[in-house]
């Protein structure tokens, strides 16, 4: 009988260890390409780790986590969401900034590198995609930029809204919109970059896209979640983030906006 209970204890410990080697990440859609590469690099040093990533809008993830969604790490495109989780006692770490995002004009059928926001008033452009500003930070910044440029009233009737910034890019890529205001981190990916250039929207036109992640309360005892959090500060991870156009905390963008051809 004693052996039976010892076996049960061993199985319980083994199950706990196996569970600790799995992590589920909720990541803002602008991180799609960067996060895929980050996870690949992380798994080289942690070959037995299971890292699952779900992409979507930061606002929706925030609501889901408040309702108990099973995410261990939350990478938000707006630092305010992780900070609010910390305040609500739903996080096991502080909100850790990981980069500043930028928005760009991008098109799969036009040379966006020769465009500016004013170009969007052209009558030939009838459908412009942005992310839904209700829950997507990149959509909020797009609205701010258009308003700052004095173009909102002219542009608003042309807008089509993606559920998140990745879907917004898909609208443009598929031709459902002629041009879009999307994340730089998506525009520099070879899949999109091969179809043309982009125009970097001057950051003075909108609030900063300060992005941050947090370990959720659910993952308080998840060692793998903490290892991934630590990995984000490593040189390989920083190199990946820079590659996809993110400005790292404490560093200058060195570019206020302009043409970028690919």
Image: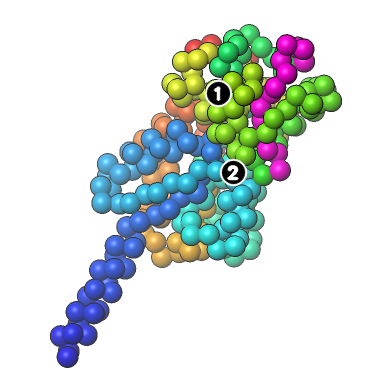
* Side of 109 relative to 244 (left or right): right
- In the image, 183 versus 109, the foreground residue is 109
Residue 229 appears at what percent x and percent y?
A: 43, 50
* Side of 72 relative to 20 (left or right): right
Which residue occupies 50% across, 37% down? 31
Asked if residue 176 can be seen in this view, the reply is yes
Q: Closer to the observer: label 2 or label 1?
A: 1
Residue 200 appears at what percent x and percent y?
A: 62, 20
Badge 1 element:
helix
Decide whether the magenta segment is chiefly helix, strand or loop: loop
For residue 229, above or below residue 103 = below
Q: Is residue 111 magenta?
A: no
Which residue occupies 59% across, 20% down? 175
Which of the 4 quarters of the picture holds residue 86? bottom right
Tell me if mark 2 has few (under 14), some (14-19) or many (20+) residues whose alpha carbon lies within 10 angstroms of its own. Answer: many
Which of the 4 quarters of the picture holds residue 167? top right
Q: Residue furthest bottom?
A: 1
Q: Which mark is residue 174?
A: 1
Q: Which residue is mark 2?
A: 57
Residue 207 appears at what percent x and percent y?
A: 70, 35
Residue 150 appears at what percent x and percent y?
A: 83, 22
The N terminus sits in image quarter: bottom left
Which residue occupies 27% across, 44% down? 45
The alpha-carbon separation of the residues under discs 2 and 1 comes to: 20 Å
Could you tell which of marks 2 and 1 lies nearer the N-terminus? 2
Q: Which residues are magenta?
A: 121-134
Badge 2 element:
loop
């Amino acid at each position: 009988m004693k052996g039976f209970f010892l076996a049960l204890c061993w199985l319980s410990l083994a199950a706990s260890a196996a569970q600790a080697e799995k992590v589920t990440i909720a990541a803002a859609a602008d991180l799609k390409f960067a996060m895929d590469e980050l996870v690949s690099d992380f798994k080289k040093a942690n070959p037995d780790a299971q890292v699952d990533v779900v992409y979507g809008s930061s606002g929706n993830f925030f609501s889901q986590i408040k309702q108990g969604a099973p995410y261990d790490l939350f990478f938000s495109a707006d630092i305010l969401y992780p900070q609010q989780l910390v305040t609500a006692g739903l996080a096991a770490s502080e909100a850790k900034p990981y980069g500043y995002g930028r928005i760009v004009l991008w098109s799969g059928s036009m040379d966006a590198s020769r465009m500016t926001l004013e170009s969007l008033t052209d009558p030939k452009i009838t459908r412009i995609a942005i992310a839904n500003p209700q829950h997507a930070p990149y959509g909020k910044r797009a609205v701010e930029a258009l308003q700052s440029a004095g173009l909102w009233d002219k542009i608003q009737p042309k807008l089509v809204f993606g559920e998140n910034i990745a879907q917004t890019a898909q609208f443009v890529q598929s031709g459902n919109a002629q041009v879009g205001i999307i994340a730089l981190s998506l525009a520099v990916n070879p899949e999109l970059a091969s179809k043309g250039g982009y125009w970097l929207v001057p950051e003075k036109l909108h609030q900063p896209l300060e992005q941050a992640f947090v370990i959720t309360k659910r993952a308080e005892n998840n060692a793998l979640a903490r290892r991934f959090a630590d990995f984000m500060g490593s040189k390989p991870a920083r190199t990946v983030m820079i590659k996809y156009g993110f400005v790292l905390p404490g560093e200058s963008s060195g570019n206020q906006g302009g043409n970028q051809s690919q």
